[in-house]
Image: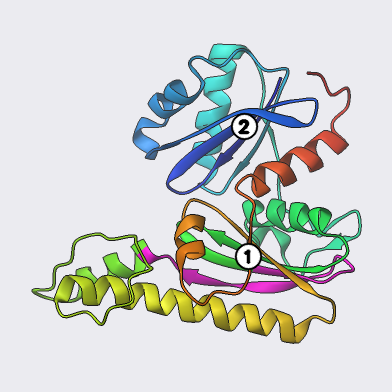
């Protein structure tokens, strides 16, 4: 088995691969202080893999924590993916590719490979809401970053005295709010809906070929529930697929 791992800012995800197919996947929330406990919960019952590929946007400390855990439990090293300027025909728009999140880069590669006949707009629905635009030739045009629903809500409540609202990730409610809690929650969702629609329209205006809109990440289901959204393709394993494709292609002696 090949093990792929995606360490985000709030969750750790993994997938086990056999002959290019995911056979097991799971995820867990974590914080850096108890990262070893999170790894134990995720990987404690996982058989020793033949190779470990990972992306990590949570900093060097979490990369070190993962490497230490795999060394202690499996006597194995982790092969980390880093963003680069070019992969095959896919050209990254950033002057400094390392400023482009490696999870976004993995999604860019997988999205273009999944729909080579189209341009793609890739929406990452995670701790932040990210957008990456890739034309049909594989040229990455750049993208946008918006706050997530949770980030907007937390910021609003932290900066506004005497304001309180229950957490409500449901964004499909169309009634006009008549109380503070609903006003905060629905207001945050409306901002996200408007931002997603605007950026998707911009993507279609700036790319000549038909555009596939791909959504991935933990909040993808929320975005898909929004009314009046453009057609979206849900690919929950997009980052894992890009990570797997790139690392398998460059790894010597891939084993299952």
Taking the spot 80% from the left edge, 25% from the top edge, the residue there is 19
Taking the spot 63% from the left edge, 77% from the top edge, the residue there is 200
Disc 1 target residue? 232
Start-end of magenta stretch: 132-149
Tell me the quarter of the picture where residue 36 sits: top left
Residue 254 position, x and y percent, is 84, 24
Q: Earlier in the sequence, mark 2 or mark 1?
A: 2
Tell me the quarter of the picture where residue 2 sits: top right
Q: Determine whether the residue tagged by mark 1 lies in a helix, strand or loop.
A: loop
Taking the spot 87% from the left edge, 37% from the top edge, the residue there is 249
Q: Decide if residue 51 is on the left or right side of residue 225.
A: right
Residue 87 position, x and y percent, is 85, 53
Disc 2 target residue? 15
Taking the spot 42% from the left edge, 65% from the top edge, the residue there is 148
Please name whichever residue, 208 or 104, is drawn nearer the observer in this view of the structure.
Answer: 208
Residue 155 visible? yes
Marks 2 and 1 sit apart, C-alpha to C-alpha, by 23 Å
Magenta-highlighted stretch: main secondary structure? Answer: strand
The quarter of the picture where the N terminus appears is top right
Please name whichever residue, 171 or 187, is drawn nearer the observer in this view of the structure.
Answer: 171
């Amino acid at each position: 088995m090949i093990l792929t791992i995606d360490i985000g800012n709030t969750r750790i995800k993994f997938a086990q691969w056999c002959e290019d197919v995911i056979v097991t996947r799971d995820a867990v929330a974590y914080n850096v202080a108890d990262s070893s406990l999170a790894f134990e919960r995720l990987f404690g019952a996982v058989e020793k893999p033949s190779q470990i590929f990972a992306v990590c946007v949570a900093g060097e400390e979490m990369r070190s924590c993962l490497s230490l855990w795999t060394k202690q439990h499996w006597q194995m090293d982790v092969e980390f993916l880093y963003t680069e300027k070019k992969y095959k025909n896919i050209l990254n728009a950033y002057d400094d590719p390392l400023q482009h999140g490696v999870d976004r880069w993995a999604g860019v590669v997988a999205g273009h490979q999944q729909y080579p006949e189209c341009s793609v707009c890739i929406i990452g629905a995670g701790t932040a809401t990210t957008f990456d635009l890739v034309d049909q030739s594989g040229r990455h045009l750049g993208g946008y970053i918006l706050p997530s629903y949770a980030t907007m809500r937390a910021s609003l409540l932290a900066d506004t005295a005497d304001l309180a609202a229950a957490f409500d990730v449901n964004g499909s409610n169309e009634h006009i709010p008549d109380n503070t809690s609903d006003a905060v929650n629905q207001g945050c969702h409306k901002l996200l809906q408007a931002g997603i629609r605007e950026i998707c329209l911009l993507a279609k205006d700036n790319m000549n070929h038909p555009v596939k809109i791909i959504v991935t990440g933990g909040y993808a289901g929320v975005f898909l529930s929004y009314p009046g959204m453009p057609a979206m393709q849900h690919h929950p394993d997009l980052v894992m697929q890009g990570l797997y494709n790139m690392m398998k292609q460059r790894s010597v002696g891939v084993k299952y």
